[in-house]
Image: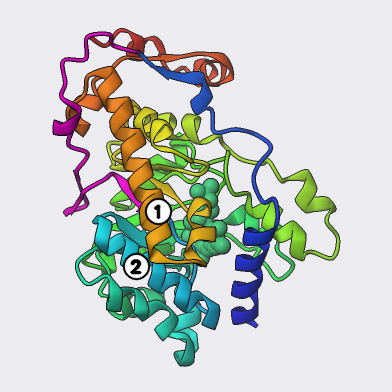
């Protein structure tokens, strides 16, 4: 039953280690310290325009839930915090709310409590016919199409026929009048797939790479035989590498996500060229508690981001994108193999 699965995912993620053993790669990326920042911390502006909406901080609460009674309180808490801090929020896959009317309010509660905030809907790639209903349900500002072949192949009841996804995503893009975001779920997106997505009309890419929540890990806890899940626990493209590859191969807005855990990592991702970042797991435990705790976490994130901006002398997000970065270690090794010039970031003024 779909609703039981939604609860199992929440409980597994709340109570177990579901993170990759590999890292995002952001530890290989260093912003260059300025001893003469020439910026007043109080004047630093972290606001952005993303897909036509203004956010006070470049942060999206990535898709987490909906589809079980327990999701309702979680989504309510996330929505209140999102509205109060003027960031953006994604809901979990809306399929359960479309196919089971008694579960619809576990999603619509988000709009009840976040009337002005940027809300991002969520459906799977083959679910073309759900797109209009998903948009209407939430009056959402953008619709994410989740891509999760790794989860599907590890999940006991997974959909293992991924043929025709490109065509159905193309159909969703041409049949809707709000921005469409192609979103991975923790294995990242490479440059070639990103280019395909751009060519078929997707409006933005949400990386969701390796270094945070692993959906092979989550499904390993549900599987009768854990061997396959354990073997593929760390499968995928590290978030920093995926972010750079997508930025190099498309001109689409990019959400850097998957394993982002603080404002300093966000500063690095944005300085590389991402528009904003997304985080899911770090909000989960607070979402069970209260909107106030979520707001505290969001405010802490923004303080950390602003501190990094202060120390590189950036008074706004556009200036942060011009700052120098040094890329070392394994991340440089991978990027060099991909023929990407890493030194250009160090050569910035
Ligand atoms: C409990 C839970 C449920 C999730 N459900 C969805 C979902 O329904 N749709 C989706 O696109 N992503 C879903 N995700 C994936 C997240 O949006 C995100 O891609 C992933 O967790 C990696 O980010 P993180 O390392 O910040 O957690 C879920 C994540 C969690 C923790």
Which residue occupies 75% across, 57% down?
Answer: 220
Tell me the SS state at disc 2: helix
- Quadrant the N terminus occupies: bottom right
Residue 330: give x, y in percent of width and height: 59, 19
Residue 288: give x, y in percent of width and height: 52, 67
As drawn, 18 above or below 260: below
Whether the residues at callouts 1 and 2 have beta carbons within 8 Å, the answer is no
In this view, which residue lies farthest toward the bottom? 102
- Quadrant the C terminus occupies: top left
Which residue occupies 38% across, 61% down?
Answer: 292
- Assess whether residue 55 is covered by the magenta stretch: yes
Residue 152 in view, yes or no: no
Q: Residues within 10 Å of mark 2 (few under 14, many from 20)?
A: many
Residue 152: give x, y in percent of width and height: 64, 61
Q: Is residue 264 left or right of residue 229?
A: left
Q: Is residue 218 left or right of residue 269?
A: right
Which residue occupies 51% across, 20% down?
Answer: 28
Identify which residue, 212 or 178, lies in the foreground: 212
The magenta segment is 33-61
Residue 251: give x, y in percent of width and height: 27, 36
Q: Residues within 10 Å of mark 1 (few under 14, many from 20)?
A: many
The mark closer to the camera, 1 or 2, is 2
Query: Where residue 182 is drawn, which disc sits there?
Result: 1
Which residue occupies 43% across, 32% down?
Answer: 265
Distance between mark 1 and mark 2 Cα atoms = 22 Å
Residue 153 in view, yes or no: yes
Tell me the SS state at disc 1: strand
Q: Which residue is mark 2?
A: 79
As drawn, 231 above or below 39: below
Tell me which numbered mark, 1 or 2, is placed earlier along the sequence.
Answer: 2
- Assess whether residue 37 is covered by the magenta stretch: yes
């Amino acid at each position: 039953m779909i609703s039981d699965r939604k609860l199992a995912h929440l409980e597994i993620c709340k109570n177990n280690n579901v993170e990759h053993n590999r890292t995002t790669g952001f530890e290989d990326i260093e912003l260059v310290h300025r001893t003469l920042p020439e910026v007043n911390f109080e004047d630093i502006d972290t606001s952005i325009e993303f897909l036509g909406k203004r956010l006070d901080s470049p942060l999206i609460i990535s898709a987490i839930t909906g589809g079980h009674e327990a999701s309702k309180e979680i989504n309510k808490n996330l929505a209140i915090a999102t509205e109060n801090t003027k960031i953006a929020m994604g809901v979990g896959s809306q399929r359960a709310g479309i196919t089971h009317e008694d579960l619809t309010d576990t999603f619509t509660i988000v709009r009840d409590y976040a009337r002005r905030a940027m809300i991002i809907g969520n459906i799977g790639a083959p679910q073309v016919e759900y797109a209009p209903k998903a948009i209407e349900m939430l009056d959402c500002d953008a619709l994410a199409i989740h891509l999760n072949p790794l989860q599907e192949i590890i999940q006991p009841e997974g959909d293992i026929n991924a043929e025709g996804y490109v065509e159905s995503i193309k159909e969703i893009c041409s049949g809707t009048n709000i921005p469409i975001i192609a979103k991975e779920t923790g294995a990242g997106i490479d440059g070639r797939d990103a280019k395909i997505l751009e060519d078929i009309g997707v409006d933005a890419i949400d990386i969701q790479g390796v270094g945070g929540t692993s959906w092979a890990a989550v499904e390993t806890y549900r599987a009768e035989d854990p061997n396959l899940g354990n073997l593929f626990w760390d499968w995928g493209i590290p978030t920093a590498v995926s972010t750079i590859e997508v930025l190099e191969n498309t001109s689409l807005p990019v959400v850097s996500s998957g394993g982002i855990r603080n404002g300093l990592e966000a500063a690095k991702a944005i300085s590389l060229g991402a528009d904003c970042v997304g985080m899911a797991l770090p909000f989960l435990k607070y979402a069970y508690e209260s909107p106030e705790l979520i707001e505290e976490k969001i405010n802490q994130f923004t303080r950390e981001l602003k501190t990094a901006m202060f120390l590189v002398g950036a008074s706004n997000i556009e200036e942060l994108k011009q700052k120098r970065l040094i890329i070392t270690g394994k991340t440089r090794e991978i990027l060099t193999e991909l023929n990407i010039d890493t030194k250009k970031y160090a050569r910035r003024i």
